[in-house]
Image: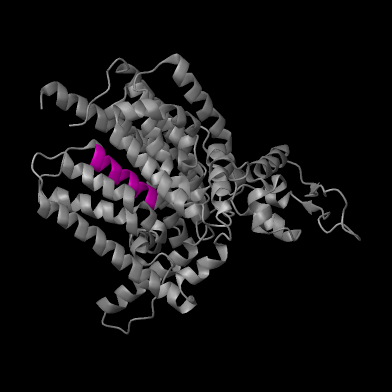
Amino acid sequence: MTTAGRSAARERRVTTWLLFGGVFACYVVLQSGSIAGEGYTGEEIVSGVRILGALQAWIHHQPTPAIEWSRHGPLPVLFDLPFLAAGRAFLVSVDYALSIQPMLLSAAIVAVTFLWIRRLATPAVALLLACIAAFGTMLWPYAYIGLETKQSFAVLLAGYAGLACAPRRTWPRTVAFAVVCGLAVALKSTGAILVPAIVFIVYVQFRRDERVQWLKCAAVAAVMMALYLASAHGRALYWTPRGGGFANLRQFLIGSPLDIAINVIGIFGSPSKGLFVYVPVLLAAIAAIPAAWRRSRDLTLFALLVTVGTCAFLCVLKYPADEVWGSRYLHVAIAPWLVVIGAAWPVYRRDRHLVVSALGAIGVPIAFLGSFYYYGLPLAAATTVNQNTLEWLTGDRTWNPIVFNGRLFHIWMDGGTEPVLWTPSHIWAWTPPPGPDPTKRAIDLRPYSQPQSFLPRFWRAPFTGAPLRIKRASELALAIGPILLIVVVARTRRIRDVQPETAP
């Protein structure tokens, strides 16, 4: 590599790390300080604490306590252990320590997205799409929700390593690549739907080598299979006492093949849960596919395989989404499609990128509302008035999460203390049932309007001890995050005329 090449590589690495730090700090500003109530995370905290206790007992030659298994097996919990151990030893609590992990992973997804696009597009385009990813998509809310961040990061990293980097010619690099690919399909029970995309990555990685290295290819396949089977065995420890995983899934399966087409449309266009509603910038990805196919066919195929594999699973469910923010299973597809946009339009052009910027800007308030409030508030409110069915939560405009959170934010901004009564009424077609309308029950939204974010919720509250440290961390991040992002913008403007790079 020439001196200029080394300088450019160093510039790219420094900018990527600054972007990672800036995005992470901005995520910390709205941290809740807790993650135990986010989906099944509480199960994984209990499982991780039990594993740490068993390790400690084994080290001290004491009786080993029983381990509580979680629904996705022990593999994802292993990545929680350093945070749980730090929470027990140094930080506020295990709950707070683990809440840092999805923020780190989400910032890492943004950084890898920037790094990948930077190989295909100019620095300005890469930074634009990275900022949209960070603050105009579901990546922002899921920095606090978690649930999907480990798998999404593993899939993106596997794609970057297999499609954007040079072929693995050494055994250490081959093993590292195999582990990342294995984690992509093993970290969650839904990982099987991503097998085609990951197998395609492996194929491309070895296809690009001058010599077909069957031994290394077999080693990658063996590592992937071993991780997947080990994870499947770990999941069985949780599901077998509960009748098996498929037995629990059966109640959610469709009853007619006609539901498949309906679900496919709803997965992307549903007003309550559609991917294009929660990530508007992906509308630009549709227009970008032809150009991306010409310039980077492997990347486009990878994004399509990730999306099609996930949709193939979702479309056979009665409800392709749940009460969690947006279409959470398609969280894994967001970053790959942003890279596709970068590959299709690598040089900034006002007519195209103003549209991309506008779509990204539309996504910012949507992502903010999902970050500012706990995703379970519509469910809690619906339960209070006996309307907590999946049909209502995933398809009724009255319980649309974006509209509901927007209503809460307006109430919170008013700053009053009086009750705010709201009736989640419905329009009967066309004759109401006899007797009192069962849906006409008012609920006070004032208690629900308090944000989950620690800093805005307790801005003026006097604190000592652990809560004060959480507040100080958020205040420090409020100062550091924007500064780092401004530095990234300044560095990018300095090299704005540099042409797209090519993968080594």
Q: Which quadrant of the rendered structure holds the N terminus?
A: top left
- Image quarter of residue 285: top left
Pick the residue in front: 97 or 168. Answer: 168
| Rendered position, 362 above or below 350 | below
Magenta: main secondary structure equals helix
**Could you say where residue 320 lies in the image, as x and y percent from the top left?**
55, 53
- Magenta-drawn stretch contains 307: no
**Could you say where residue 438 lies in the image, as x and y percent from the top left?**
83, 59
- Please indicate whether residue 336 sits to the left or right of residue 452 in the image: left
Viewer can see residue 242:
yes
- Please indicate whether residue 209 sits to the left or right of residue 458 in the image: left
**Could you say where residue 234 lies in the image, as x and y percent from the top left?**
35, 70
- Please indicate whether residue 52 sits to the left or right of residue 94 in the image: left
What residue do we see at 22% from left, 46% from top?
Answer: 203
- Magenta-drawn stretch contains 156: yes
- Please indicate whether residue 261 sits to the left or right of residue 46 in the image: right
